[in-house]
Image (spheres, coloured by chain):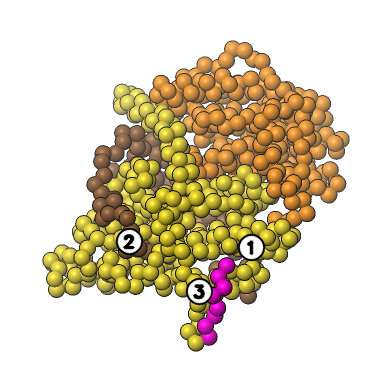
Amino acid sequence: MYAQMIKSTGEGVKSLDDMEPEERAFQERINAGGKIEPKDWMPEGYRKNLIRQIGQHAHSEIVGQLPEGNWITRAPTLERKAILLAKVQDEAGHGLYLYCAAETLGVTRDQMTRDLLSGKMKYSSIFNYPTLTWADMGAVGWLVDGAAIMNQVPLQRTSYGPYARAMVRICKEESFHQRQGFDIMMKMAKGTEAQRKMAQDALNRFWYPSLMMFGPSDAESVHSAQSMAWKIKMNSNDELRQKFVDQTAPQAEYLGLTVPDENLKFNEETGHYEFSEPDWDEFFDVLKGNGPCNTERLEARNRAWDEGRWVREGLLAHAEKKRKTAIAAE
Amino acid sequence: MSDALFEYLCRMGDNTLVLGHRISEWCGVAPVLEEDIALANTALDLIGQTQLWLGLAGEVEGKGRDADQLAFHRDVWDFRNLLLVEQPNGDFGRTMMRQFLFDGWHLAQLKGLMTSSNDQIAAIAEKSVKEVTYHLERATDTVIGLGDGTEESHKRMQDALDRLYPFVGEMFIADAVDQAMVSDGIAPDPSTLRPDYDAMLDAVLAEATLQKPTDDFAHKGGKSGARHTEHLGHMLTQMQWLQRAYPDATW
Amino acid sequence: MSSPESSPYSDTDAAPHGKARATEWPLWEIFIRGQHGLSHRHVGSLHAADAEGAIKNARDVYTRRNEGVSIWAVPASAIAASSPEEKGALYEPANDKVYRHPTFFDIPDEVGAM
């Protein structure tokens, strides 16, 4: 998915003239659309921000496995089970690609994992919401992945090479995710009365959390300005949110479902939908750890990590023994 | 004859269905990301094989049941999977030991099916052999690595082997269904697969520094459906819940 | 990327980091030559306890088991690098897992791009 709560370092954006030569060369390269690679010089703020952003993005993928994983064993057909499993597996893969990208910045995956497990590093708040019915698998794919894609597609052009390359691969795989979600929603929305009710309920619960995924308005933010100058943030939050609503509202209509916002309407003049803001107090509550599933999600990650420790150690010890035997044989 | 064939196909399909389901329970909580992804691949292979086996079973039965109906609308006594595969995951070591013990039999069985007199079965076997060859390779490496790893990993793998070994025997006991398959040239006699399996097992366990239990006792009742363990029912209540709660819905 | 001003996290969230735990598996760089590929291409990295494990993990992570590929696994620490200038290394999903392809899902035209 992506990281919504990134705050950049810096006191606002420096002008090229105020920069030392190497920083100036760095910024000019970014301005010209060039890529920064691991061994290139980079400002410490750029490196730190990237570690945090890519790390949070990676954590979001890994924690994001849980709400959907919640339904793999209850998927209603063999095909649905296979598709959902393949999708959640992709999320593990995306987490892996992103961790690897962050690792090029001089941090290890285990270090980032430890920071996730201790609560020091964050993941996308959307995954602190529960998945209560099968229709939620539809809503998560359609809305949550839909919102994530809005964020991720522009990031394929981000200035940091390994991150951009990871995003290219991820975006290629994500397209099937949103489609499988919409496919479930179509089946539900056009199914029995009970299924239609489930679909509407899922939309009701996931609509505003999906809008929150883009983060609060950042129109006036100097931090965002710095991230945008560095091209590690490509669009403003409001811009992406508007794009998401514009794309999603007609899809809901197609499904015959009602977006839970009585203010939602198409403005002929602007060519955009008008819509209500989500409840930002709720957003900050969830961010602080008070979402419906924060505790369970972190518990699950911690348990997997703790219970897997002997496996990681065991295989490493075996590899070490083999290595020593090989050396002795030479 | 077609009853025996139906039974046989349910055995193949229920094994992959139940084990695929068990493996899918690991999704998102495996010890390390790479293993999480690998386990999901194994589960996906097994679910895919299930669709083929149970699809064919439904065709042979000729009562209009498809793979999903067989998977989601039969009760415990109609399941024909080996007791081994319905055993709970336990820790990662037990999961991989179960996988290894099953894969060794599964691969031998599938190789025998590649020359089946039934073309459809031979075709499914040919596709599956490629996948299962890799399952066995991976499970073998893991059993060896963890058996030989640390003191703790060694102990856990020995515990897993001790716990699961009594479910090995059932895979090789031939019954009337198997006899019917043998006489029609459809499937190999499972009892003939045992010597090679034992040799493979001994070699791997030696490398893994694990001791094969001396007691050859074998629990049975899975593939005949006569007496499953209590675990299967719990698995089915979860797996089949949506289908049974909303029987008039399509998904 | 999106950045709430009132974010409770300090600028130093990501740093400094302590020492990595001794149990971390080494990092490997993975190179794959596809069925009709002329040479191996870098596709990404992963963690594994040893070389054999790295190759198996690469099969699972980067080829999703597509057959007929040749895999190289190189310890990341053994790579000497100038400044790589690699374009996105795309991989082909396994051919029999059709549902990985977006086109598997038939989305009605009225719904628009997805």
* Quadrant position of residue A108: top left
The residues tagged by marks 1 and 2 sit, at their Cα atoms, a distance apart of 33 Å
Is residue B226 placed above or below A38 in the rendered structure?
above
* Quadrant position of residue A50: bottom left
Q: Which residues are magenta?
A: A260-268
Q: Position of residue A13 (x, y in %)?
A: 22, 69
The residues tagged by marks 3 and 1 sit, at their Cα atoms, a distance apart of 18 Å
Q: Position of residue B149 (x, y in %)?
A: 41, 25
Q: Residue furthest top?
A: B214
Q: Is disc 3 placed on a helix, strand or loop? A: loop
Disc sitting over residue A275 in the figure: 3
Q: Is residue A219 magenta?
A: no
Chain letter for mark 1, please.
Answer: A
Q: Colour of chain C?
A: brown
Both labels 3 and 1 in a single chain: yes
Chain letter for mark 3, please.
Answer: A
The residue indicated by pointer 1 is A200
Q: Is disc 1 placed on a helix, strand or loop? A: helix
> Counting residues from the N terminus, which is met first, the one under dot 3 or under dot 1?
1
Q: Is residue A261 magenta?
A: yes
If the image is split into quadrants, where does the C terminus of chain B sit?
Answer: bottom right
Q: Position of residue C53 (x, y in %)?
A: 43, 37
| Nearer to us in this view, A226 or B130 | A226
Q: Amino acid at mark 2?
A: Ser
Residue at 22%, 68% in the rendered image: A12
**Left or right: B61 with respect to B149?**
right
Is residue A72 placed above or below B173 in the rendered structure?
below
The residue indicated by pointer 2 is C6
Q: Tell me the yellow chain.
A: A
Viewer can see residue C41: no
